[in-house]
Image: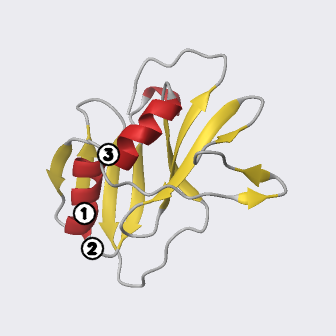
Amino acid sequence: MNLALNTATTILPVDDAARARSFYTEKLGLPHRGMTDNGSELLGSDGGPMLQLLPVSDGKHSEHTALSFEVRNIERIVQDMEARGVRFQDYDLPNLKTENHICTTDSEKCAWFMDTEHNILCVHETLGMQVEYQL
């Protein structure tokens, strides 16, 4: 069995599935695929990776990056997302510093933001590699 050949679904806990669906479809442009019997919202393109927004009642969410989207031209993506109302996090730590919301390392550029449910998300650009898809 080779799991790399199967479509993966990322499951994110959300307090309000409708509010989260609105954020992911309107702010991030992800296509809405429907709703499951348990009230989860499904997002993604046919045959591609899926995102499931799972309603939770405990309000617990991850304290680390839960999902990262690989993009090209992160500077333009960050500007476009900001224009749609996405608020990026800025950091000034010894090992993590952002400039114009973007942290640059030897291998990648990253910018972090939260969804409406306080899940930490990221857009990242791998330096020196070609990416065939875009957010």
Residue 92 vs residue 71, the one in the foreground:
92
Q: Are marks 3 and 1 in contact (CB under 8 Å)?
A: no
Residue that carries the numbered disc 1 in the rendered image: 40
Residue drawn where x is 39% and y is 48% of the image? 82
- Check the picture and name the quadrant holding the C terminus: top left
Q: Is residue 112 visible?
A: yes
Tell me the distance, in whole angstroms, between the alpha carbons under discs 3 and 2. 17 Å
- Say what amino acid the circle numbered 2 marks: Asp
Looking at the picture, does residue 84 appear above or below residue 132?
A: below
Asked if residue 80 lies left or right of residue 19, the reply is: right
Q: Is residue 1 visible?
A: no
Tell me the distance, in whole angstroms, between the alpha carbons under discs 3 and 1. 18 Å
Residue 118 at x, y percent in the picture: 45, 69
Residue 60 at x, y percent in the picture: 48, 78
Asked if residue 71 lies left or right of residue 107, the reply is: left
Q: Earlier in the sequence, mark 2 or mark 1?
A: 2
Q: Earlier in the sequence, mark 3 or mark 2?
A: 2
Q: Are marks 3 and 2 in contact (CB under 8 Å)?
A: no
Query: Disc 1 on helix, strand or loop?
Result: loop
Q: What crowding class fits label 1: few (fewer than 14 Cα within 10 Å), some (14-19), or many (20 or more)?
A: many
Residue that carries the numbered disc 3 in the rendered image: 28
Label at residue 16: 2
Looking at the picture, does residue 33 appear above or below residue 47?
A: below
Q: What crowding class fits label 3: few (fewer than 14 Cα within 10 Å), some (14-19), or many (20 or more)?
A: some
Residue drawn where x is 43% and y is 35% of the image? 77
Residue 38 at x, y percent in the picture: 21, 68
Residue 14 vs residue 88, the one in the foreground:
88
